[in-house]
Each structure stands twice: as structure tokens, then as C-alpha cells.
Amino acid sequence: MTGSIVIYFSIMGMLAGTIGMILSKNIIKKILSLGIVETSINMMYTGISSRGGIIPPIVSGDFSLSYADPIPQAVIITGIVISFALLCLSLVLAIIIYNNYHTMDVETIERNFEREEE
């Protein structure tokens, strides 16, 4: 039951983050929305892995118990590290864009970029 609730909340978080990335004009808001999507994906993996069982996967001899699967846990840790690196790289890119164009508005940056190409 708890795993299903976590999955539903993660789907709502993914939808909210995706809508934020699409509708926002500010680069920082887009990066924060990307962070929400990444966190929601990690939360969905957590919900999926909690469906199998809640007992740590240390086999002591009783094989009738439902053990937690350690593979999704490793995937979650790797996903957290990758999402953190992606957010850091995105923020550095946003700083570089701000230093070049002196704005965070996507439409203004696109107009200035098109003028530079001509």
C-alpha cells in the first residue's frame, strides 16, 4: 500500500516538474524543475523496491520471508549521484550563459543568439 502511494506521488512530481520545465522562461526555474523530476524518479524507484519486502537482504536461513531487493537500492544511489552531477553542471552552464547575455530569460537569450549569428 505504501509503495503505491509513493509511486503516485512520484508521478505527480514528474508531471509538475515537466510542466515547470516546459512553461518556465527562467533558466534557473527550469533547472529546479529538472531537479524535481530527478527526485521524483528516484522516489519512484524507492516505491517500486519497497513493494518486494522491507526486511534487509541478509539471508539467515529462513527463506520464507520476503526480502528487499538490493539491486534497486544500488540503482537509486547511482541515480542520485548522476542527478547531482547533472544539476551542478547545469548551474555552471547557467552562470556562463548569464555572464555572456546578462539575463536568465530564455526568449531574450534566443533573440541575442540569433543576432550574433547574423
Image (cartoon, rainbow, N blue to C red):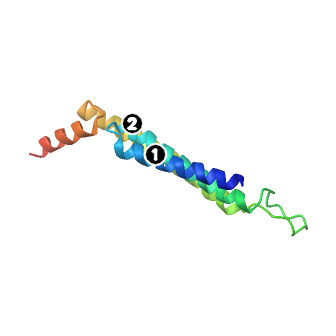
Q: Report x, y in % for residue 58.
A: 83, 61
With 87 as the anchor, is 27 left or right in this view? Answer: left
Which residue carries the number 1 mark?
Answer: 17
Q: What's under tag 2, amino acid-wise?
A: Ile
Residue, far top = 102
Residue, far right = 61
Can you tell which mark lies on residue 57?
none
Number of dots carrying numbers: 2
Which residue carries the number 2 mark?
Answer: 28
With 35 as the anchor, is 103 left or right in this view? Answer: left
Q: What's under tag 1, amino acid-wise?
A: Gly
Element type at marker 2?
A: helix
Q: Report x, y in % for residue 79.
A: 56, 53
Q: Residue at x 61, y 56 (%)?
A: 45
Out of 52 and 12, give the one closest to the viewer. Answer: 12
Q: Quadrant of the N terminus?
A: bottom right
Work out whether 69 lies above or below 40: below
Q: Quadrant of the C terminus?
A: top left
Badge 1 or badge 2: first in the primary sequence: 1
Work out whether 35 lies above or below 41: above
The image quadrant that residue 76 belongs to is bottom right
Q: Are marks 1 and 2 in contact (CB under 8 Å)?
A: no
Q: Residue at x 47, y 49 (%)?
A: 15
The image quadrant that residue 4 belongs to is bottom right
With 100 as the anchor, is 83 left or right in this view? Answer: right
With 86 as the anchor, is 69 left or right in this view? Answer: right
Crowd class of label 1 (few under 14; some 14 to 19; many from 20; radius 10 Å): many
